Image: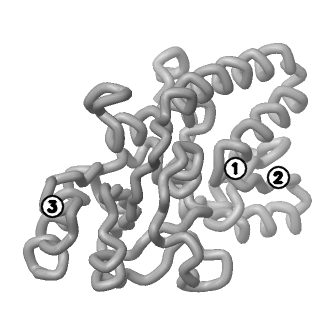
């Protein structure tokens, strides 16, 4: 929660989980406009529109999406000067990171941990987008998605071992970042193929926090870029 608005935010009525908002509770609030996320909230937004309550759907997967939406909200709130100031600051911080990247990029695999499965993230995910900004080679680039438009492809440990990435990045949708570490530790121990992967042998496994890589960090997106940069290149950006 943003500290400056903590009390105000916590005092707002709950309308359910981000992935399953309660339309009845939203209607009780009687909003003039509803802002929703493409994918997990599309059906909710469609239902709101059918009931005559305007709902806007936003795609928030990439850095460019964030920049575009900050501009949109600046116009909606009639505060374009502040939105442009935020964008200018983000662009400057991003450039400062990118300008320090080494000439020879490292290769990565981006694991995705849930309570019931393991998969690999593609370039159209938040982590994939950040890896692209940092010039990293995502070994899953070009692999077929689980379903049309999906961010993930099935886990193939033999393929990962064959590609032998320099670093393993781990994203998660599970109860906590700590549980993601526990699941991956068990996975590494249970499947001997993992022990042939250089990143496992060297301990080059970076756990990406959910606040940056599960939920889109919005105006703090550059903090996610910096986090991954430190995880992959601690010698350049400093240790996590």
Residue that label 1 marks: 28
- Dot in front, 1 or 3: 3
Q: Earlier in the sequence, mark 1 or mark 3?
A: 1
Q: Quadrant of the C terminus?
A: top left
Residue 119 falls left or right of residue 217: left
Residue 150: quadrant of the picture: bottom right
Q: Nearer the viewer, residue 162 or 24?
A: 162
Residue at (73% x, 46% y) in the render:
65
| Res. 56 mark | 2
Q: Earlier in the sequence, mark 2 or mark 1?
A: 1
Dot 3 surroundings within 10 Å: few (below 14), some, or many (20 or more)?
Answer: few
- Dot in front, 2 or 1: 2
Dot 1 surroundings within 10 Å: few (below 14), some, or many (20 or more)?
Answer: few
Q: Position of residue 38 (x, y in %)?
A: 71, 61
Residue 148 falls left or right of residue 98: right
Q: Position of residue 231 (x, y in %)?
A: 32, 41
Residue at (73% x, 19% y) in the render:
88
Q: Nearer the viewer, residue 24 or 187?
A: 187
Residues at marks 2 and 1 touching, judged by CB atoms closer than 8 Å? no
Q: Earlier in the sequence, mark 3 or mark 2?
A: 2
| Res. 182 mark | 3
Q: Nearer the viewer, residue 45 or 101?
A: 101
| Res. 109 mark | none
Q: How is the image coloured?
A: one colour
């Amino acid at each position: 929660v943003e500290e400056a608005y903590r009390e105000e935010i916590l005092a707002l009525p709950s309308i359910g989980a981000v992935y399953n908002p309660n339309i009845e509770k939203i209607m009780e609030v009687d909003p003039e406009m509803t802002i929703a996320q493409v994918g997990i909230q599309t059906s909710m937004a469609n239902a709101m529109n059918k009931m005559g309550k305007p709902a806007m759907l936003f795609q928030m997967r990439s850095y460019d999406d964030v920049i575009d939406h900050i501009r949109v909200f600046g116009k909606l709130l009639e505060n374009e000067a502040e939105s442009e100031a935020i964008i200018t600051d983000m662009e400057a911080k991003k450039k400062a990171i990118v300008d320090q990247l080494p000439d020879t990029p490292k290769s990565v695999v981006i694991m995705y941990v849930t309570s019931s499965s393991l998969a690999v993230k593609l370039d159209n995910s938040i982590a994939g987008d950040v890896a692209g900004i940092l010039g990293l080679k995502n070994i899953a680039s070009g692999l077929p998605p689980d379903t049309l438009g999906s961010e993930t492809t099935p886990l193939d440990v033999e393929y990962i071992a064959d590609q032998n990435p320099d670093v393993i990045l781990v994203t998660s949708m599970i109860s906590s970042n700590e549980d993601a570490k526990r699941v991956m530790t068990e996975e590494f121990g249970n499947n001997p193929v993992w022990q042939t992967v250089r990143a496992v042998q060297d301990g080059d496994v970076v756990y990406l926090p959910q606040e940056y890589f599960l939920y889109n960090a919005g105006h703090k997106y550059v903090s996610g870029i910096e986090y991954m940069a430190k995880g992959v290149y601690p010698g350049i950006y400093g240790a996590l």
